[in-house]
Every structure is written in structure tokens, then in C-alpha cells.
Amino acid sequence: MLKIALINPQIPQNTGNIARLAAGINGRLILVGKLGFSLDDKYLKRAGLDYWEYVDLETIDSIQFFLDKYPPDEYYYAMVTKFGNKRYDKIYEDALNNKKEVLFVFGNETEGLPDSLHSMFKSQRYFIPMNDKHIRSLNLSNSVALVIYDYLRQMDFRGINV
């Protein structure tokens, strides 16, 4: 089961879209830290449509609890950030080489990933190629979809019904 962690997500519509994606791939969505919305938010629910019953959703109060529950010596943390040093399409190969289950980690819409995670996982930071002349970043839910579906493609879509 693929695991997607959002650190301190702020926009309910993005989280709802990502929850819908998680349901569609039989993945787990892990919301870590302070949320910028309530899980009862109407925009969150609307974005996830009627798929919420199929979402494997986990909430974890802090980054430290997250690291304790998903120890970095057992999981390959694929940190997706504009400050990455490798393209996102290298995650699959890197995770295989490390012989660990991959855990996809995305920062929030306004601040990205916390400095503490950047420091811990310097060699596990990945970026999505784009020019930086007109925009700072891509939409979070688009980024998650792009990265996850490329990873699934490289896995020949094992684990989801196609």
C-alpha cells in the first residue's frame, strides 16, 4: 500500500483531492501536524466527493510522532520539494536500491516542508522539473498525482485494479 504524507496541509480542497486519489489507488493518506482546516470542512468533503468511506486516512499530531510511527530506518522517505536535488522519477529506483517501502512526503501549500525534515533527508529530496520564471510551485494535489502515478507506472500499476 502506497503511503502519502501531507505535512501541515492548509487547503481543504487539495487534501480532499489527494484523499480521493488515495482511495483510487488503495493508498493511505497520512495527515501530519496542524491542519489548516477541520476534517469536517465542507470543501474537504466536497473535493473528496462520496469516496471518503474508501479513504484509508490517518492523522498524526506531530512530525515527531510521525517519525516514531514510521521510522526512517524502515521506510524510504521520498521528500518532494522544489529544493530537491533529484527528479521525482528517480524515487522508484532509489527506494528499490534502499530495499525499503517508500513513504511519499509533501509539505504544505504555503511553507513547504519544515527545515527539520530537509536536514534529516537531504539525499532523499526530489523535485518536479519546471521553469521558475512565472510560478513558485505547482498545485499540491497536482504534484501528488503526478508523482504517485509516475511511481505506479514504474511499478506496472501493481496493487491497484486496472
Image (cartoon, rainbow, N blue to C red):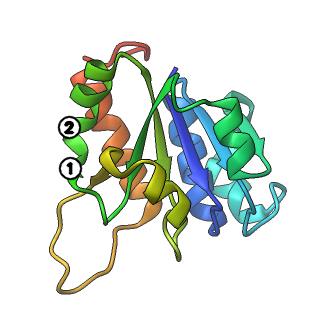
- Residue 133, x across and y down, in percent: 17, 86
Q: Residue at x 75, y 62 (%)?
A: 34
In this orientation, which residue lies closer to the viewer: 81 or 46? 81
Say if mark 2 contacts mark 1, CB within 8 Å. Answer: yes
Q: Amino acid at mark 1?
A: Lys
Is 37 above or below relative to 88?
A: below
- Residue 16, x across and y down, in percent: 62, 53
Q: Report which residue position mark 1 lands on.
A: 86
Q: Residue at x 41, y 66 (%)?
A: 139
- Residue 39, x across and y down, in percent: 80, 55
Give the Cα separation between the discs numbered 2 and 1. Answer: 7 Å
Q: Report which residue position mark 2 lands on.
A: 90
Is 102 above or below relative to 131?
A: above
Q: Callout 1 environment at 10 Å: few (<14), some (14 to 19), or many (20+)?
A: some
User: In which quadrant of the rendered image does the C terminus lie?
Assistant: top left
**On the rendered structure, is 151 left or right of 22?**
left
Is 56 above or below relative to 112?
A: above
Q: Residue at x 54, y 28 (%)?
A: 27
- Residue 43, x across and y down, in percent: 70, 64
**On the rendered structure, is 144 left or right of 152?**
right
Q: Amino acid at mark 2?
A: Lys
Mark 1, secondary structure of its residue = strand
